[in-house]
Amino acid sequence: MVLAYPLIKGLNMNMKTQPNRIFCLSLVLLSLFFASCSSDDSPVNQFTAQDLSLIHGDAEKTWRITAFYRNYDQRILHDFNDCYLDDQYIFKAATEDVEAILGQSGCYWDMPDEAAATVSYSFNPENGRIMLNHGRGESRGDDFASNFFFIQLQELSETRMLFADDIDGRLVRAIELEKVN
């Protein structure tokens, strides 16, 4: 309305004699209003099928985890950060599977009897989203613990990837990976 007042005052119009100007002014103000209300329905991170070659190298490509965050924006590491740092993921082109090579560190127990991870990625060409589907479990004796989550690719380069949950523009749980040479 701040913009509209000088326009209306400057016109110094009589409503009875200048209905066309009022109509035109109303259209201009209405169009300014709608132009300022842009839709933000499209995803921020749109990737293409060609971007997938950065992930899997057209066959397979090995990445190592450099950090696992509980809150990426605030740089708060996840409680499981240490047990993820010695893991490597091999992204495969043919199957969208990720071979998880787990390190020696356990997440739930120092020395688990068994540890396994099931990881895959998926690409949706319609919205350009690449998702990482992640599950990890460990057992020790009769006890079993697991963690499952889905996170979206946020950043991609030839040597770095960042998958994270985006909640209202804030990046929270995140896995940061770098290419293994």
Image (spheres, grey):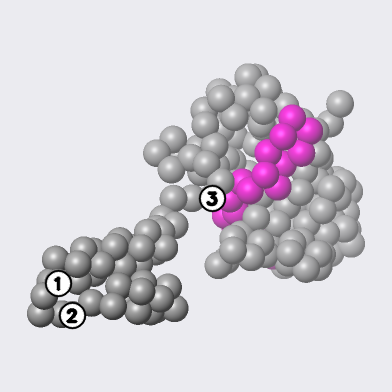
Comparing 75 with 22, the one in front is: 22
Asked if the magenta segment contains residue 138, the reply would be no
- Which quarter of the figure is the C terminus placed in? top right
Q: Position of residue 78 (x, y in %)?
A: 78, 65
**Predominant SS of the magenta segment:** strand
Which secondary structure, mark 2?
loop
Comparing 52 with 84, the one in front is: 52
3D distance between C-alphas at marks 1 and 2: 6 Å
Q: Position of residue 113 (x, y in %)?
A: 81, 55
Q: Name, please, the residue furthest toward the left.
A: 16
The vertical placement of 78 against 84, above or below, is: below
Which secondary structure, mark 3?
loop
Q: Earlier in the sequence, mark 2 or mark 3?
A: 2
Binning the other alpha carbons within 10 Å of mark 1 as few (below 14), some (14 to 19) or many (20 upward) gives few
Q: Name the residue tied to disc 1.
A: 18
Residues in magenta, as a range:
145-162
In the displayed structure image, the side of residue 92 where residue 4 appears, left or right: left
Q: Name the residue tied to disc 3.
A: 44
In the displayed structure image, the side of residue 68 where residue 46 appears, left or right: left
State the residue at coordinates (42%, 73%). 3
Q: Name the residue tied to disc 2.
A: 14
3D distance between C-alphas at marks 1 and 3: 46 Å
State the residue at coordinates (65%, 55%). 164
- Kindly indicate whether the residue at mark 2 contacts the one at mark 1 (C-beta within 8 angstroms): yes
Query: Disc 2 marks which amino acid?
Result: Asn
